[in-house]
Amino acid sequence: MNRRSSTLIGVALLAAGYAFPASGATLATYTFPGADPAGDTNAPTATNLTFTAFSRVNVSAVSVSELFESASWTTAGTQNPGEYVQFTVTPATNFTLSLTTLSFDVQRSVDKRTGGEKDGPLNSEVRIFTGVSLTLVDSQNFSPVGAWQNVVVNFSNFTSMDGETVTIRLYGWSSGHQNGWLALDNVRLEGSLSPVPEPSPTVLVSCGFLVFFVRCALRRR
């Protein structure tokens, strides 16, 4: 297809009312309100989006109010892909989800010398997957510290297909002790939700004209 034909298709789609996703807005925020376990099982709600509560895989819960805190991270110097915390978000059928930013507050424990609190993970990574096959689409490493810090993951041109689930996982490793923990709060997901456009009479007519134009051009050649 030549440049002129491509331009005509674009004009036809715009004329038919096809719109590009709007700039990112807050889709939902996890705040983990109340005492455990109710705070840990909290999941935000949003129109045409389904969020799951945070869950843990091969790490243990730490009982603390208003936070999502987990221990038993590997003490090895390399990531254990089988240890993580995660949540999922799924757009409703006939909607696509475009993500722009994931942000959260995070803190690791530090060795108090006396008592049971030990160093938490020195290294962490966020990974974003799509679909039931868990296709990796984005990731970002960061280094937790002993004070609250805000981590921001910026997505680049990421869009989930119609009704496709997005899974977000956080990993931790290089923990000083099995009792070392990571705490999360104010997990915010930003982006936009767009209805899947249905073919309109304008689009069908435009496509018909385009087919006619291309056939005429080929005949002239």
Image (spheres, rainbow, N blue to C red):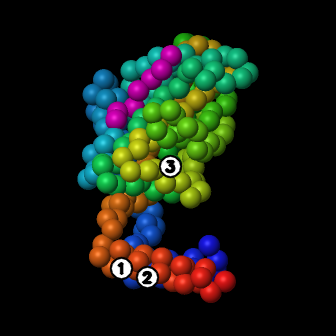
Residue where numbered disc 3 is placed: 102
Q: Which type of secondary structure does the marked residue at label 3 adopt?
A: strand
Name the amino acid type tagged 3.
Leu
Name the amino acid type tagged 1.
Val
Magenta region includes residue 54: yes
Q: Residue at x 30, y 23 (%)?
A: 37
First of labels 3, 2 by sequence position:
3
- Residue 197 vs residue 11: left or right? left
Q: Which type of secondary structure does the marked residue at label 2 adopt?
A: helix
Label 2: how many residues lie within 10 Å, few (<14), some (14-19) or many (20+)?
some
* Position of residue 196 measured from the top left corner of the image (x, y, whole percent): 35, 60
Q: Which type of secondary structure does the marked residue at label 1 adopt?
A: helix
Residue where numbered disc 1 is placed: 205
* Position of residue 35 measured from the top left corner of the image (x, y, whole percent): 29, 28
Name the amino acid type tagged 2.
Phe
Residue range corresponding to the magenta coloring? 52-58
First of labels 1, 3 by sequence position:
3
Q: Are marks 1 and 2 in contact (CB under 8 Å)?
A: yes
Magenta region includes residue 132: no
Name the one closer to the observer, 118 or 54.
54
Give the foreground label among 3 and 2: 2
Q: Residue at x 67, y 31 (%)?
A: 123
Residue where numbered disc 2 is placed: 209
* Position of residue 107 measured from the top left corner of the image (x, y, whole percent): 55, 35
Q: Residue at x 56, y 50 (%)?
A: 152
Name the one closer to the observer, 152 or 92.
92
